[in-house]
Amino acid sequence: MLEYAEKDISSMSNDMRLGKLTAQSLTEYYLRRIELYDKQGPCLNSIIAVNPHALEDACVLDGERKAGKVRSVLHGIPVVVKDNMNTGDMPTTAGSAALQRSRPAKDAFLVEKLRQAGAIILAKTNLTEFARHGVTVGSLVGQTCNPYDLLRTPGGSSGGTGAAVAANMAAAGLGTDTVNSIRSPSSANSLVGFRPTTGLLSRGGIIPCSCTQDTGGPITKTVSDAVIILDACAGYDPEDPKTAESLGRKRGSYLPYLNAQGVRGKRIGLILNNFGCHPEILRIMKRAEDVLRDLGAELIPLDIPEFETVLMNQTCDLQLFETKSCLNIYFQSVPDCPVKDIDELIGSGRLHASIVEDMNRCAHIENPLQQPEYFKRLCTIAEKRSLAYQIMAEHRLDVFLYPHQQILVEAIANQSQNGRNGILAAVLGFPAITLPGGFSEPSEHAPLGIPVGIEFMARPYDEPVLIEIAFGFEQKTRYRLPPVSTP
């Protein structure tokens, strides 16, 4: 079964079609890897809970296949989901000891869509508690480690999904992204992370941070796998009114945009002021630029001080104002929820120390609509969105390009995550994809080096353009390598 470690979803699905592989054997293989590497061996600590019904689900899906019923290319494929997505058959904890026994009544919309497509929900993954920052640590199971360097974080807040998928404990996974949280662990774990246009995927059944900025999305080993999951999960959900905006914007599958020649003729704007000055990042970005030119793209250097990410975090992020009302609504939606509101959550004394101050600040915002700063930030976002459209029109750009993180992913000891550029797509609502750009120089603790992700951002609902460029770049470079710590 070792040959399935780095296989993509289509290849595994084809082997199932040919009778060379079963959902049961593949599930057993991934469960064995979780047993070997998550709580022993390198102790990645990426998994909060394994689905006790996973093997039973696999047997049912094998039976369906034998009977001639194949739901989709995901039929029988084991995936992991971040543990802030509701699962009706397992607790949903947000990585918090306070919600250890919280059992939602039904699956989140995205989880339900995956199950309908025939995917097996193998496990729930660790996250920064309540998805509040980018280190992936919480009060329930503690810190997740980066499989490429066990002394570094896996990014976050979806770092459990990132570490698990990178270490081949599942075929693919789902994360959520409010500022950086799908793309940060993808950058840090040599993976593909896709933040879709806000509203393309439902937020229904996801423990919220911001009703404006939240989205779910795939974390995978390949662009094609990300597209398969994006196809399966997209759709209108009456529980998330934002998804109504997507109706008519996605016509058919995104799979036809997996075009190896998709970079040719594209105009790509380099946001140079968000490249930073770390020599390894600049080396990797320079190589990416050379590849894109060789593939037929035209690169346009730009300096856009309005998009500087420290400034955007200070003036655009809406989490502080929206968390309390969103969380309180979520708690009220869960039958017999262990906490009734954010005040009780904080008062429980069970939160990880790293998020207490942030949650206290959120708890003091009674009504965002009565906060002048909230309206100021909404106006600033609107101005920056208009500027993005204007710059793309003026320079005839298809996408922007920048490194996801201006420095290497941080050491666990720092308990912070600096230099990330994901805020730009998050507050504008634009789609962005992060994919492997290569590795830093190897070191004692990082035998392959530290993964570095490059990120492309397009206009809303221009996912096809992102897919074409990302797939063309991936097929030319093949930079992803599995970690040495989980052979």
Image (tube, rainbow, N blue to C red):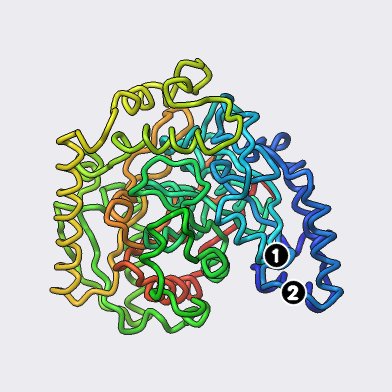
Which comes before the other along the chain, label 2 or label 1?
Answer: 2
| Marks 2,1: beta carbons within 8 A | yes
Q: Is residue 75 above or below residue 340?
A: below
Left-right relation of 333 to 384? right
Within-10-Å neighbours for mark 2: few <14, some 14–19, many 20+ = some
Q: Is residue 65 above or below residue 483?
A: below
Q: Position of residue 224 (x, y in %)?
A: 55, 71
Q: Position of residue 461 (x, y in %)?
A: 36, 70
Which residue is disc 2 drawn over?
70
34 or 103: which is nearer to us?
A: 103
Q: Quadrant of residue 14?
A: bottom right
404 or 41: which is nearer to us?
A: 404
Instruction: Using the rendered image of the protein, determine whether residue 439 is visible from the camera's viewpoint.
Output: no
120 or 104: which is nearer to us?
A: 104
Within-10-Å neighbours for mark 1: few <14, some 14–19, many 20+ = many
Q: Residue at x 55, y 56 (%)?
A: 110
Q: Which mark is residue 118?
A: 1
